[in-house]
Image (tube, rainbow, N blue to C red):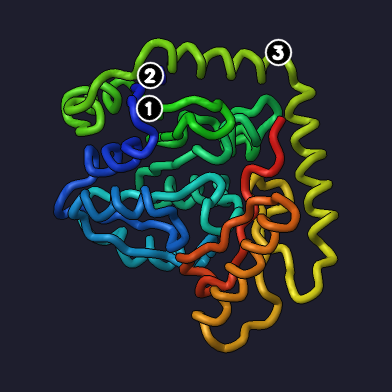
Amino acid sequence: MLRQLELSCSVSTMFSTIPCFCKRGDIIVADEGVHWGIQNGLQLSRSTIVYFKHNDMDSLRSTLEKIMTKNLRRYIVAEAVYQNSGQFAPLDEIVKLKEKYHFRVILDESNSLGVLGRSGRGLAEHHGVPIEKIDVVTAAMGHALATEGGFCTGNARIIDYQRLSSSGYVFSASLPPYLASAAITAIDVIDQNPELLVKMKQNIALLWKGLSDIKGMSLASNPESPIVFLKLEKSSGSTKEDLLLLEKMADRALKEDSLLVVSSKKSFLDKCRTLCLSGTFRY
């Protein structure tokens, strides 16, 4: 039976969840595109970290094959919707590899909760993967649920262990009841108004259509992603110059059109040649 642990700060969710389970001597195989919060959690764990190429299942398979011979605790860490690329994790394939090579999976659903799946339950529902096949699921509640805090879901043993060992839970105040109530209300609103998910998908499609013909730029994220990325079709050859160009574009969009866009300053994927549009479409 699945249980849940709530944390008072969304940022500390991955900061404390990963180090709670992963210790020195363990091995974590992580997607190279994970966001900075996960990266900090990986560093705090003091585990051996091995990165595989972003969303490349051949790279993941090759990495797991090399590690499976070691008699160590082994984890795969991924995001449902990558904050640094707007791409979806191929969760169905990750679960198959997890079962084949006997790894545990930690999945962050922060950007997919309330967005993906028939009822907004996230990437697991989107791919039709039983949630029980994912060992640990985390999410920040400051995105689609529009409140603060985060949560971790797993079986009873996992959650009970976190209550004793998770720094974000043990050494912090409990999640205020009004924030928990706000999150529950947001979930109820999504459940009772399925047309909101339909409207959001229409908004994403409309944004894609509007951005698809920008000269010199191309869309780089998943067409269903709530985080939309544009990238330069052709690099100047200098990461610094590419970043300056993107920052000028972002400044101009804000000044002339009151449109807030953000130039991605850190990306393993395309050396900062990316422009991120996030939060421009809500329910």
Vertical placement of residue 268 versus 191, above or below: below
Crowd tier of the residue under label 3, counting other residues whose Cα lies within 10 Å: few below 14, some 14–19, many 20 or above: few
Vertical placement of residue 102 versus 231, above or below: above
Q: For marks 1 and 3, give the CA distance.
A: 26 Å
Image location (x, y in percent) of residue 78: 45, 50
In the rendered image, which residue does mark 2 sit on? 3
Q: Amino acid at mark 3?
A: Gln
Q: Is residue 57 visible?
A: no
Which residue is at a point 21% across and 52% down the rendered structure image?
Answer: 26
Viewport quadrant of the N terminus: top left
Q: Nearer the viewer, residue 90 or 171?
A: 171
Image location (x, y in percent) of residue 107: 44, 42
In the rendered image, which residue does mark 3 sit on? 192
Q: Are marks 1 and 2 in contact (CB under 8 Å)?
A: yes
Crowd tier of the residue under label 2, counting other residues whose Cα lies within 10 Å: few below 14, some 14–19, many 20 or above: few
Q: Amino acid at mark 1?
A: Gly
Vertical placement of residue 110 versus 235, above or below: above
Residue mark closest to the camera, 1 vs 3: 3
Quick one: SS at disc 1? strand
Q: For marks 2 and 3, give the CA distance.
A: 23 Å
Q: Earlier in the sequence, mark 2 or mark 3?
A: 2
Q: Amino acid at mark 2?
A: Arg
In the rendered image, which residue does mark 1 sit on? 154
Q: Nearer the viewer, residue 50 or 86?
A: 86
Which residue is at a point 22% across and 26% down the rendered structure image?
Answer: 172
Residue mark closest to the camera, 2 vs 3: 3
Q: Earlier in the sequence, mark 1 or mark 2?
A: 2
Which residue is at a point 46% across and 69% down the rendered structure image?
Answer: 268
